[in-house]
Amino acid sequence: MLFQSCAAQSKPQLIDAQQETVTKETFDYYLYFPEAYETSPEDKFPLLLFLHGGGESGDSLVAVKRNGPPKLIARGKQFPFLILAPQNPHKKKWWNTVALKQLLDTIVQNHRIDTNRIYLTGLSRGGGAAWEMAVQYPDTFAALAVVCGMTPLPYAAWIDKKMPIWVFHGEEDQSIPISESETMVARLLSMGYDVKFTRYPGVGHDSWIPAYNTEELYDWFIEQSRSETP
């Protein structure tokens, strides 16, 4: 009887509440400046955001130079745009894309960046983060290049349809199968997106080696601008 009486008197309550949360992250990063940045002080320049793979995560920034544009820069290659290459401080966590966008915004605000020519690229875990950023921030980037990254297939339509995309993947990839890129590319093409797809026969997960050694990729980036995209 006592239990029944208490149960009858208790009523579920729905409470309205609000709490502001703050995302904090500490990024070490490299920032590359082309030679013309100093010699042409009145000009604004494009910027490429590069997101590394899981193997370069941690607290040793020099690891970011193992692959991609930072590796090429270390070998003496010159680029016509700034390159922002942050390090994911967490070895076993995904990139914090909200914090990445905050970092990117800060770099843009404090340097002479052409905001119509901000480019995005990433490999492996960084490739997945690049897809995610293209979904979350569709008005930011003028072009996207993804190398062997996992894809947000259900949200493909959220990506800016005016943004050109180039996807690279090795056909023998055992870590992130090429089917990830195949299905995403097929979905985007079916919706009328401008997508290029480069497949590497006989290449495994390290498809970033031939991809970032493709000189045409950087020429393709520099040709893209949000203000000029039809």
Image (spheres, rainbow, N blue to C red):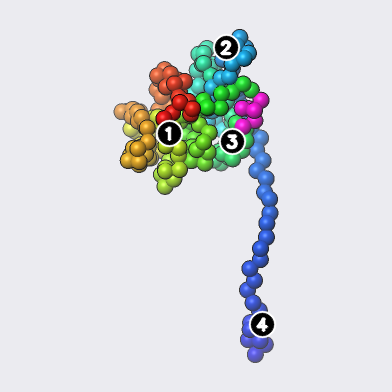
Q: Quadrant of the N terminus?
A: bottom right
Q: Whole-percent x and y of residue 118?
A: 53, 27
Could you tell me residue 58's position as x and y percent?
60, 33
In this picture, residue 177 sits left or right of residue 14: left
- Which amino acid lies under the numbered mark 3 shown in the image of this protein? Lys
Does dot 4 land on a helix, a strand or a loop? helix
Q: x, y percentage for residue 180?
A: 38, 40
**Up-down: is 4 above or below 209?**
below
Q: Residue at x 37, y 32 (%)?
A: 194
Q: Identify the mark nearer the N-term, 1 or 3.
A: 3
Circle 2 is placed at which residue position?
36
Instruction: Read off the residue under disc 3.
Output: 101
At label 1, which amino acid type do we have? Lys
Residue type, label 2: Ala
Q: Name which of mark 3 and mark 2 comes first in the sequence.
A: 2
Mark nearest the camera among 1 and 4 is 1
Q: Amino acid at mark 4?
A: Gln
First in sequence: mark 1 or mark 4? 4
Instruction: Give the residues drawn in magenta, as a range.
Output: 105-110
User: Spatial distance from mark 3 to mark 2, Cα to Cα?
Assistant: 26 Å
- What's the distance in space between the residues labelled 4 and 2, CA to CA? 76 Å
Q: Name the residue carrying label 1.
A: 162
Q: Secondary structure at mark 2?
A: helix
Q: Is residue 53 visible?
A: no
